[in-house]
Image (tube, grey):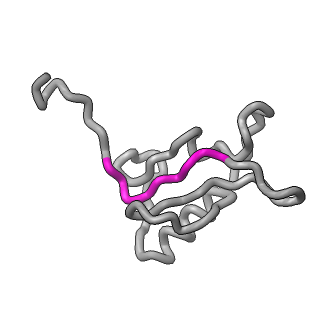
């Protein structure tokens, strides 16, 4: 396989992992990493933007794979799969 035929794999600074069940009475959450370091739990798109901004990263496009990698769902996936309900926010 040559370099040209290899698929492009971006290495964004921000990764938002799959949805996890919250504690009883708590909302589901996603773990967020910046530069490979776990920075905490986020429960919405707003949380992602705020956490990035607090570390000096401005996100202009949440759909840009060179900026954010969404693992286990997209930016609108904030509920555990199985219920298949998706929250926006």
Is the residue 59 above or below the residue 15 in the image? below
Question: Where does residue 18 sit, x and y in percent of width and height?
Answer: 60, 45
Give the quarter of the figure containing the N terminus: top left
Relative to residue 85, is residue 34 drawn left or right?
left
Residue 87, position as x, y percentages in the image: 73, 46
Asked whether, in this view, residue 30 is left or right of residue 5, the answer is right
Quadrant of the image occupied by residue 27: bottom right
Q: Estimate the x, y position of residue 36 in percent, counting from the top left.
A: 40, 60
Magenta region includes residue 51: no
Q: Which residues are magenta?
A: 11-19
- Dominant SS of magenta comes to strand
Q: Nearer the viewer, residue 79 or 45?
A: 79
The reply, left or right, for residue 40 in relation to residue 37 is right
38, 65: nearer the viewer: 38
Q: Kindly identify the residue that appears in the image at 32 percent across and 50 percent down.
A: 11
Nearer to the camera, 85 or 82: 82
Residue sticking out furthest to the right: 25
In the rendered image, residue 74, in percent from the top left (x then y), is placed at 57, 41
Q: 65 above or below 5?
A: below
Q: Residue at x 36, y 53 (%)?
A: 12
* Residue at (69% x, 58% y) in the render: 43
Compared to residue 4, the image places residue 12 above or below, namely below
Residue 42, image quadrant: bottom right
Give the side of residue 82 with respect to residue 18, left or right.
right
The residue sitting at the left extreme is 2
Q: Quadrant of the C terminus?
A: bottom right
Number of numbered callouts drawn? 0
Q: Quadrant of residue 65?
A: top left
């Amino acid at each position: 396989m040559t370099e040209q035929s290899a698929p492009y794999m971006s290495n964004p600074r921000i990764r938002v992992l799959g949805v996890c069940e919250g504690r009883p009475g708590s909302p589901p959450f996603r773990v967020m990493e910046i530069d490979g370091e776990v920075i905490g739990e986020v429960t919405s798109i707003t949380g992602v933007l705020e956490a990035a901004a607090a570390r000096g990263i401005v996100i202009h496009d949440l759909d840009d794979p060179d900026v954010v990698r969404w693992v286990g769902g997209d930016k609108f996936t904030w509920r555990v799969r199985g219920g298949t309900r998706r929250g926006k926010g």
